[in-house]
Image: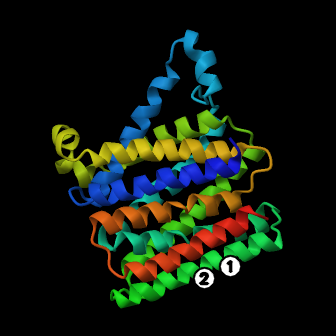
Amino acid sequence: MTWIALGLLAGLVLGTYDFLTKLALKEKTVLAAVFWCSVLGALIWLPFFYAPMSWSATLREVGLAPERLSSEQQMALLPKSVMMVATWILSYYSVKSLPLSISAGVRASGPLWTALGAVLLLSESLSWWQWLGLAVSMGSYYLFSLIGRKEGISFRRNLWVLCMLAATLLSSANALYDKYILATLHMDLAAVQAYSAVQRGGIALLLLPWVFRDLEVVSLLRYNWPVPAIAFAYVLAEYIYLAAVQMDGALISVISVLRRTNLVMVFALSALFFAERFIRQKIVAIGGVLLGIVLTILH
C-alpha cells in the first residue's frame, strides 16, 4: 500500500475517532477523557514489550515489535508525547463545546501550517499543483468560518475556536517532529509509537488530582464505551499515519492533507446523529476540501 493510500486510510480512522470523542465527552469531562485515552493507549502497547520471542518475527513484519530505546532516545521522544497530550486537552474542550463540523473544520487548517513548516524547516518542495491544492483546501476552510458566523460562532473571539486553533498548531509541530525523529534520528517506527504511548500514560497521571472522582472503571466499560474506543482508534490512526510518514518519498505536507479526509466522515456522522445545521453550505465547503485533496494527489 502506498503512502498516499495510507494517508487516506488514516483520515477515515481519524473521522471515526473524532465522532467517538464527541460521544465520549457527552458523559465524561475533558480531563477524564484525556486521562483514560492516554492510560488505555499505553495499556494497548504495553503487552508488545513483553511478547514471547517466538512471536517476534511475525510482530516485526506487521510493525508491532518495538525496539528498545536508550534513555537519550526516550528523552528525544518526550516532546512529541507532551505535545500530543496538550493537543488532546485543547481540542477536546473545543469538540465538547462546538458543533463537530465546525471544530473539525478548524482542525482541518492543519495542512497549511504543516506544509509551511515542511518547506521552511525540512526543505520539502511542492509543485504548483500541490500549492494550488493547498490553496483550494484553505479557501474551503474559510467557508467554514463563514458558516460558523451563521451559527453565532466568531472565529476571532470564540474561546473554543481559539483552543482548536492552538491544538492545530501544536499538531502541525508534532507532525514535523515525527518526520524528524523517524527520518533524521532513525528511530524504530513501532518504538516511537509504543514508547510515546507509555509516556503519555505517565503524563496523564499528573491529571489525577482533577479526575480522581471520575475514575469508575465499571461505568467506563459498561456505560461509556466510546472512551476506550477512542483510545483504540487513535492508536490505530497513529500506526497507519506513521507507517505512511516513514515510506520512501513520503511528503509530510501531503500526508497532512490526506489525513484531513476525516472531515468527510465527521460531517456525515454528525449530520446523522447530532442534528447539524446549514447542511448544504457545509457540503460545498467539504467539496472544496476534497477538490484540494485531489489536486494535491494528482501533481
Residue 95 in the image: above or below residue 13: below
Q: Tell me the kind of residue under disc 2.
A: Gly
Estimate the x, y position of residue 81 in percent, counting from the top left: 52, 49
Report the residue marked by disc 2: 139
Q: For this rendering, which residue is in front, 243 or 165?
A: 243
Answer with left or right where residue 116 lies relative to residue 71: right
Q: Position of residue 132 (x, y in %)?
A: 74, 76
Image quarter where the C terminus lies is: bottom right
x and y percentages locating residue 47 in the rendered image: 45, 24
Amino acid type, residue under disc 1 in the picture: Ala
Is residue 178 shown above or below 47? below
* Residue placed most toward the observer, 21 or 196: 21
Image quadrant where residue 85 sits: bottom left
Residue pictured at 47% horizontal, 32% vertical:
45
Q: Residue furthest top?
A: 54
Up/down of 70 relative to 252, above or below: above
At 30% from the left edge and 72% from the top edge, which residue is drawn? 97
- Find numbered disc 1 in the image and state the secondary structure of the residue it sits on: helix
Residue, x 56% and y 39% (percent of image)?
Answer: 193
Q: Secondary structure at mark 2?
A: helix
Dot 2 and dot 1 residues touching (CB under 8 Å): yes
Question: Mark number for residue 135?
Answer: 1
Whole-number angstrom distance, CA of label 2 to CA of label 1? 6 Å
Q: Residues within 10 Å of mark 1 (few under 14, many from 20)?
A: some
Quarter holding residue 247: top right
